């Protein structure tokens, strides 16, 4: 999926119009390197339609308006999400720690509980197809999550 397609998908999920999105970008006053000016609504529409290649200097502004990490625009796979999470956990500050604790203690965590048995059973059934190095990687990752979980208790 192209970046402009990903942006459009996120806009649909967030029920944000292209016009509203474009106006929010313009409010942040990003400056294009080649012109030194803020892009126009027409230029932003061209980026969103894929007619013109998205300017890399707009990525932080787009992520800010969409309230997402920049990396999500490029790769939202489970592997990429795990990399982001691992990176944050390796050098977590107090604010991030408190945010995580609050999220883990909130009602949002219940959305994982209802399907845990189905997910675990499905994963367990597929382990027979996994190569040994992959299984060792999973084991180490799960041990790391256990250690992290134990820290929060």
Image: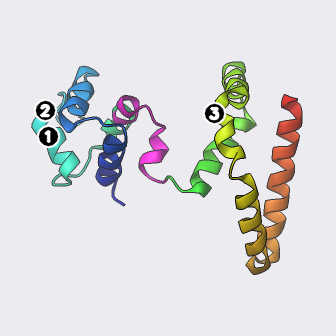
Say if the magenta span includes residue 92: no
N-term-proximal mark, 1 vs 3: 1
Which type of secondary structure does the marked residue at label 2 adopt?
loop
Number of on-image labels: 3
Q: Which residue is mark 3?
A: 108
Tell me whether circle 3 and circle 2 mark residues in contact (CB < 8 Å): no
**C-alpha distance separating marks 3 and 2:** 39 Å
Tell me whether circle 1 and circle 2 mark residues in contact (CB < 8 Å): yes
Q: Where does the image place residue 108, in percent across and percent down from the top left? A: 63, 33
Drawn side of residue 36 relative to residue 145, left or right? left
Q: Where does the image place residue 44, in percent across and percent down from the top left? A: 18, 39
Q: Where does the image place residue 96, in percent across and percent down from the top left? A: 67, 25
Residue appearing at x 35%, y 29% in the figure: 65
Q: Is residue 30 visible?
A: no
N-term-proximal mark, 3 vs 2: 2
Q: Residues within 10 Å of mark 2 (few under 14, many from 20)?
A: few
- Which one is closest to the eye, mark 1 or mark 3? 3
Q: Which residues are magenta?
A: 62-75
Q: Residues within 10 Å of mark 1 (few under 14, many from 20)?
A: some
Which type of secondary structure does the marked residue at label 1 adopt?
helix
Observer-nearest of 91 and 130: 130
Q: Which residue is mark 2?
A: 40
Q: Which residue is mark 1?
A: 43
Tell me whether circle 1 and circle 3 mark residues in contact (CB < 8 Å): no
Q: Residues within 10 Å of mark 3 (few under 14, many from 20)?
A: few
Residue appearing at x 48%, y 54% in the figure: 75
Tell me: residue 118, above or below residue 144.
below
């Amino acid at each position: 999926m192209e970046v402009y397609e990903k942006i459009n998908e996120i806009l649909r999920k967030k029920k944000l119009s292209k016009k509203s999105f474009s106006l929010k970008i313009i409010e942040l006053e990003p400056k294009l390197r080649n012109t030194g000016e803020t892009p126009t609504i027409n230029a932003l529409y061209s980026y969103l339609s894929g007619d013109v290649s998205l300017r890399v200097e707009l990525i932080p502004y787009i992520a800010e308006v969409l309230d997402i990490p920049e990396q999500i625009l490029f790769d939202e796979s489970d592997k990429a999400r795990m990399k982001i999470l691992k990176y944050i956990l390796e050098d977590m500050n107090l604010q991030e720690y408190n945010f995580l604790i609050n999220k883990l203690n909130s009602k949002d965590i219940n959305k994982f509980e209802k399907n845990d048995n189905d997910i675990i059973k499905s994963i367990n059934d597929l382990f027979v197809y996994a190569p040994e190095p992959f299984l060792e990687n999973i084991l180490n990752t799960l041990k790391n999550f256990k250690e992290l979980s134990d820290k929060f208790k």
